[in-house]
Amino acid sequence: MTRLLAWSALLLGCVFFALPLVGMTEFSMRMLREGYSFEAYRVVLVDERFQLTFSYSVLMALATIVVGMVLVVPTAYWVRLRLPAARPWIEFITLLPLVIPAIVIVFGYIRLYNTSSWLPLTGSTTGTNILLMFGYVTLSLPYMYRAVDTGLRTIDVATLTEAALSLGAGWVTILTRVILPNVLVAVLSGAFLTFAIVIGEFTMAALLDRPAFGPFMQLLGANRAYEPAALAVIAFGITWACMALIQLATRFSKHIQVQR
Amino acid sequence: MAYLELKNLKKSFGPTTVVQDFNLSVGRGEFISLLGPSGCGKTTVLRMVAGFEIPTSGSIVIDGQDVTRVKPNGRNIGMVFQAYALFPNMTVAQNVAFGLKIKGMGRADIDTRVREMLKLIGLPELGNRFPFQLSGGQQQRVALARALAPSPRVLLLDEPLSALDAKIRVSLRTEIREIQRELGITTIFVTHDQEEALSMSDRIVVMYGGVAEQVGNPHEVYNRPRTRFVANFVGTLNTLDATVRDADAGTLTMAGVDLTLPEGGLQAKSGERLTVALRPEAVQLGRGADSDIVLPGSIEDVHFMGSVIRLKVAVAGSSLSLDTFNRSDMPPPAVGAAIEVSLSPKDLIVLQG
Amino acid sequence: MPEPRPGPLSRLNLNWLGLLPFALFALLFLILPTMKIVVGAFQTPDGNFTLDNIYGLNTESIVSSYWVSIQLSLITAFLGCLIGFAMAAAVILGKLPGKVRSGLMTFSGVASNFAGVPLAFAFLATLGPVGLVTIWLRNEFGINLRAMGFNLLSFWGLVVVYLFFQIPLMILMIAPALDGLKREWREAAEILGASASQYWRMVALPILFPALLGTFALLFANSFGAIATAFALTGPQLNIVPIKLYAQIRGDVLGNPHLGYALAFGMIVITALANGLYIWLRVRSERWLK
């Protein structure tokens, strides 16, 4: 009885989730009248704007990951090691981007860093790129911090640090050679998740007028019929790949832990 | 007439049978322990009595009522789990009151009963605490009060002490037994700790591989184990090889010495080799007054355990453990010292099977 | 970073120094921008204090956009919690095989992140005017969804689309809490005479309450601030706050830059209220937690 209910609840959910995926895939292959084809994908992939925006977003995502990690890993480590009292505050700040909508934050950027302000980031292309990148770091902050902090919880930060210090290691060595390898899986999980979030992000890129993948998809969607579906399939594939990589990293870590 | 009757219980999960041919009659007010290693089926038996598992075959009768197919919430049974089973969102008093509330008892009556139960377990002041504010021992006492509050017909205890510190474990043992006696409630206690089973129970069921190996009072189970498993599992045991000389007369040759068993006849053929067992406390250092057999040996190891000293002695090619009481005026023998040990044939346990 | 020296004062200072990069980042890219909005909402273009911007929100169009947004967020958060809870409970408590569970969790991770523009495309291809399901229903069963009042580009259409990421998010968030329900609690309640519904009402739901509430608040904020999906689906027409704010940032459609601040400030107030309510209720309901 319980099991029957459980299965039917699950089945109903599966139908709801499967239909849009089936729908977009089917639709994306209907571009040619004579039957199913990959024409829409071909058209999208050879589109120069696709190549430009996609590579721009990939670069943005990578920069976001690097900067985010440089910011988050030492901070989370330091808080665990020396400032446990600051943890609630740091956690509160890292959770703020979940509460304050992205559109509000970017609105603040535009007004705070406009051409006539004390830090005119939006005045130049490089400045705007940097601003967008930091915007993405902000968006991914809750996920990155959570992932790294969870990773740090599983290791004994204090003992590892003392051991490394007693062997004469400096702080940079400790962070890169001792702490980072131990939380690598957590860092990777955070990184893939960040990639999935950044690659298709729309609001910030559109409002800062940067040629990113998200606004491009939106533009294409307003003007074309079949190509958007192909883009949706591609975007879903990327998201799925990121999640699969997270799973892979986690499984790999379990493997190592068993061997220890 | 038995109050709780388990008849031919069998439980299989898929192809594996975890309990079979299980029969037990429990008298009203009796304290029965199910003792065995993990995986022996003792918990499954308890869970069948509780109703969490439906027996594959067999029946369970409580006070004349067949409850085999009755759901757990209709059985009126109390149960204490291994640990952490208190509802974390309720205070101690609310936990104890839970069963009474379900029964639809009036508020005033519930309050009275809860106060009574908290007094019974010796925690009358802690009614407003939440479970996380209690020690492990206190939590288990509250769990006991919660189980007992609705006046259940049978009390089931599923290794309630195994998650506790050694000291509290021992003191709570006594306390549980006292409360059980005071209320006269029929109780089944599951444990893997033979000391717990021996010290608390009216009768013990030793289980292994899903079957009851032996049922008896602590004295019987300890002193007259019926199978090799029971002998090994309950208490420490020395084993010696022996050869049957005359099965009908009950005579054996052991370590080069001939001896006669007081009980007489053996269910073995003459000339057959078999194993005899001996408790450490039945081996005596030096010559005993009425001991029939004296064997030479040498000390291999000395474990000073406080009131008791356990010696390992090499005798006739095998190693024997023996216990002797500590005496302040007599230091234990040194390792390597040549000594004599004596033992009485009446303490020998012939292991069959 | 230099090694901290003994002595309480210097040690304290150096320790706080370690947080400087993070504090600087948070200040520049999170706190100051937000403060700019909050302060701007109470300022005239000349920088004087005023409440006119807040009063200015009280136009029919703006009030109704807030109302639609709040309704949308409440409904998708509620349905997301309900359906997500049912699915998570089915998989975790319903004795389904472990493979089903890990499959659902992985898929939830993907689906909860598959929001924004591509999600809108997926639904357009499925339930849009020429979508797979729309055509199929019309050709095979003669059911015309549009004639029945369903329009993907409407409020309820948006609800359906939002559920695609709200439900998985709920599943991800509530699964650990469901795992935390100990078997002993259920069994203890059962043997004390409780029925399944009594167990849920008196034990399981009170224990899950903080987690349920937290997820609800998160789902609410998640959909309240979401814009990409709605924008890609309906364009700038749909009257919800984020789209209104988007249009205001792009082209000052309200004709008053500081009214934009007030609009954004209103969004912060509402998500903050939702989360504040959550925190207050959580503190109240979690007296029994360490």
Image (spheres, rainbow, N blue to C red):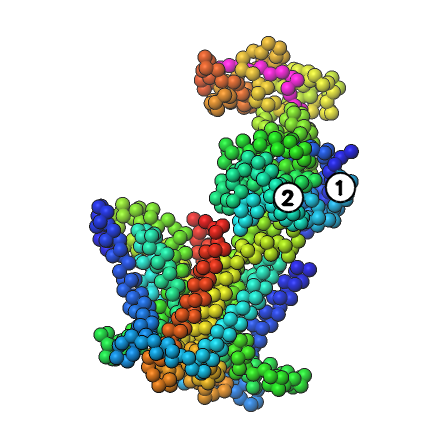
Compared with residue B310, is residue A179 higher up or lower down, i.e. above or below? Answer: below
Point out residue C182 in the picture as x, y percentages from the top left corner.
56, 51
Task: Residue type at mark 1: give it.
Answer: Val
From the image, state whether disc 1 or disc 2 is nearer to you. Answer: 2
For mark 1, name the chain: B
Q: Which residues are magenta?
A: B338-353
Judge whether A203 appears above or below B308 on screen: below
The numbered dot on residue B281 is none
* Disc with the residue nearer the chain's start (1 vs 2): 1
Q: Which residue is mark 1?
A: B61
The disc at residue B109 is 2
Q: Residue at x 72, y 22 (%)?
A: B266
**Spatial separation of the CA atoms under disc 1 and disc 2:** 30 Å
Q: Residues within 10 Å of mark 2 (few under 14, many from 20)?
A: few
Depth order, front residue of B274/C113: C113
Residue B213 in view: no
Q: Position of residue B20 (x, y in %)?
A: 71, 42
